[in-house]
Amino acid sequence: MPGLEENGSRLTAPDADPQGDPFLRARFVVPARPVTFLWRERLVRHLDQALRTPLTMVNGAAGEGKTLLVADWAARCEGPVAWLTIDAAGQGPGMFWAYVLQALRACGMSLPVEIGCPTDASRVPPTLLARLAAELCARDRPVTVVLDEYDRVIDPEIAEQLEFVLHHAGDGVRLILVSRTEPLLPLHRYRAAGDLTEIRAAELAFTCEEAAELLALHGLRLSANATRGLVERTRGWAAGLRLCALAARESPDPETYLKEFEADRTTVADFLLAEVLRRQPPETQDVLLRVSVLDRFCPELVNALTERTGAGPILAGLCRDNAFVEHLGQGWYRLHPLFGEILRAHLRVRSPGLEPELHRRAALWLRGSGSLADTLGHGAAAGDWDFTAGALVDDLAIGRLFTGLRSDELTELFSRMGPEARSPATDLVRAARELSRRDLDRGQTHLRRAEQSLSAELGLTAVELGLMRDPREPGEQGPARGHDGLAAEGALTAAEWSPAGEAPGLVAARLSCALLEALAARLTGAPGRAELAAAAAETLRDQVPADLLDRHPELTALLLAHLGSARLWAGRFDDASAALSRVAGSSAGASTALAREDSLGRLALIDYLNGWPSSAERKARAALTETERYGLPQPSGSGMGRLVLAAVAVDRDELGRAQALLDEAVRSHPALRDPVMEAGRAITTARLHLARGDTRAALAAAERAVPAAVVSPWAEGQTALVVAAAHLAAGRPEAAVEVLGALPGEQAACAVGAARAQLAAGRPGAAADLLDGVRAAGRVGPAVTVRATLVRAQAAAEAGDTSGSRRLVAQALREARREGLRRPFLEAGPWIRPFLGTPSPQGAAADWFTPGAPPSDGQPPPVVEELSGRERDVLRRLALMMSTEEIAADLYVSVNTVKTHLKSAYRKLAVNRRNDAVRRARELNLL
């Protein structure tokens, strides 16, 4: 035939494709951009590199904005651009190259007739490709060829031919592939040679700033928080943002709509179901629907859900094809969040009732893989509470309900557990939840039920189980501690605690029982019961794998903290310090932060009660930093650190600061509001009232009952000191003598208080005897010895020994100066004023103490602890009148993070409002 070569190519420019049909000219047209199209400079700059590399790939999922990005760039490009949109039908090599040649002609490029044109849709002559490559190579100025929707090219022969032309065309062509999938080209070679420009899904995703501009083009102006939330939900997916914006425009409250819309009932769902799900083969569709119940997944987990094998290649293919499946590394994947929402809704319609079963299968697989958090989530979603509670208990993770970054999440998760779930594990979880809220009646009821169930399973009586209430209480202070600080006299032997062949799950349940028993004992002020629980735990620990205990250091830390606090209540300070010091010195981490804070606070209280305020202050400050360091949910601390700082502030006559710290201490973790805390708060409040001269309020606060199984000697003694001081202030020395004389045991501070009362009652000899006993006892701190020295000074003054009294007052001032103690001098009475007003030879009072003028009351209270760098950053922006949202955006953090920093800064500055915080920071030269 005329015009044909022997190899089957046409020499004249054709008007029709190889099948004789007219060319579809719309496929050569650069797509128009909608009026709401957003020009993104960062992407355009990157795309400009296409003019410097032979190959450019713009790769992303459906609706990522690939085509519009390249179309906008092509429309602005100065050189010739040949655009071809690939058609899914008839993609034989001959048809493909016929359209490529026509696209080149359509952009104005003149091709010699010698190149020819395919006449067979299924093949193309090699000479045609060679002539085309030679023609392109000879060009002075390269032509840009854009192949849109290149993912529709699935014939490897076409890919090989394209690579041949690209390689031999040299600098005469710039090829841009717009594709949802990885093209069948040797990309690694181009990448290694620096001849490849790549723009992928992560770069195509809209930033928050770009999303705000896009929404504005749609007539929507949202807050920064709302925009950020939408970007997080869509992961910056262009089509999702546009479709959401179009739907929100029809709502009277766009911001609320975008926050609450159900993805499965929008055009977003229609788009994804049509463009992604229904394009997959049935087996792949089934995989996508089933994995929609998972936050992340791996091939083995997917196989467990489908009860088939071969998930690995399917997941790899979905990821490679940009089917909204993202590879996280290490063989794990996740779905795009919007796609996941839509698939879950579709799953419920297509397979009603399957979702709980999928969650159950996932929970079983995850439990075997050691992923506890995911196991619990899927077990709860399946409604299998016996399994879920059992997983928590068997993993020795019941302490996570009290401490750690996820304690609130766990509490919320198990709040959905109904009363129909009945097993030792569910009762233990219920007991932990109630005790964490300090509901002792309900908590102990559930705990008893769990213990009875375990006793029945083991064939033991409740007493043999070893976790029932200590029969020696109330009244006895508890058995002596063992060598390791946990064991108690009379504890059951290891054989009694662990019958032969006991299942590991039962050991974990009993160890969890011991922890909750120790907590209940602490909250009820029952030290003997706490010792018994600790002994049980110590014996059971030997039967638990070491790696399991290592994964949950909070179990041991909480047990020791509960034991230490119970011993502290009993007045066994050395034994309490031994247990609490082990916790305070344990390895740092979020899971043990609460226990460390609690223990440091109680160690500070022991120092304070022994009369060492500076040491108590250092430990209390250290306690404050523990929970804040890890951003734990509030209220997260025991409040004991602040309580001790308040008590020290009273001794230093910093009454405003003391009140602020007391107010802060109220916001403590409910599970740690034990008798130690309640008595400490009552006594410190009473002493603050007394310092302000309100004896009636002081007596009311001091005499407030603190329920406990046994009486605490130090709490009784400190209360008696406040009551006695009130009597002395009211001129009733005999009543003060009677109150302090009724105290059992020997407490140095009480002995000094009794000596002061005896002196006021006119019995200096009895006072001297009491003070000699304090001197002989030793190991008491300056808060006690300063007061003792002042009682001796008063006795000397009343005996007419003025020089001796002045010497003793000067001695007390020197000792008090190191600790900043002012209250002992202000409480001493009128006799001391002449000695304070007259400078001593040593000048002890001249530069730090002025009688009658407390140095800090009425002045801004000092900072409780140093502000962190990030808290200072927030304060600086607060001073610039920036909103919380503006600060978050400026620091690239969330609004909740800014609020957390603000709360912490407010507490440290002892303020409650923004303006006060700025003013206070300026006063302290922090800004």
Image (cartoon, rainbow, N blue to C red):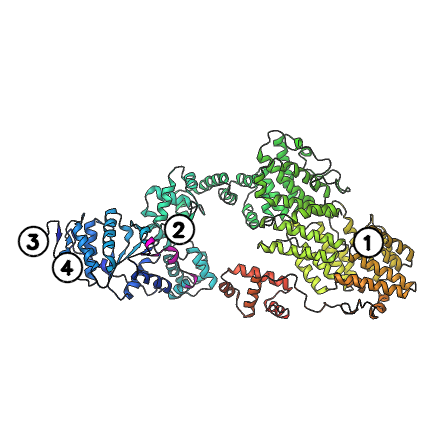
The residue that mark 1 highlights is 750
Q: Which badge, 3 or 1, is on the more N-terminal residue?
A: 3
Q: Which badge, 4 or 1, is on the more N-terminal residue?
A: 4
Query: What crowding class fits label 1: few (fewer than 14 Cα within 10 Å), some (14-19), or many (20 or more)?
Result: many
Picture quarter with the C terminus = bottom right
CA distance separating discs 2 and 4 = 49 Å
Given residues 707 and 17, the one toward you in this image is: 17
Residue at position x 90%, y 58% from top?
A: 761
The residue that mark 4 highlights is 112
CA distance separating discs 3 and 1 = 123 Å
SS class of the residue under badge 1? helix
Where is residue 290? Give x, y as percent: 41, 43
Which disc number belongs to residue 339?
Answer: 2
The residue that mark 3 highlights is 2
Q: Are marks 3 and 2 in contact (CB under 8 Å)?
A: no
Residue 320 in view:
yes
CA distance separating discs 2 and 1 = 70 Å
Which circle, 4 or 1, is nearer the viewer? Answer: 4
Magenta stretch, residue numbers = 191-209
Which circle, 2 or 4, is nearer the viewer? Answer: 4
Which circle, 3 or 1, is nearer the viewer? Answer: 3
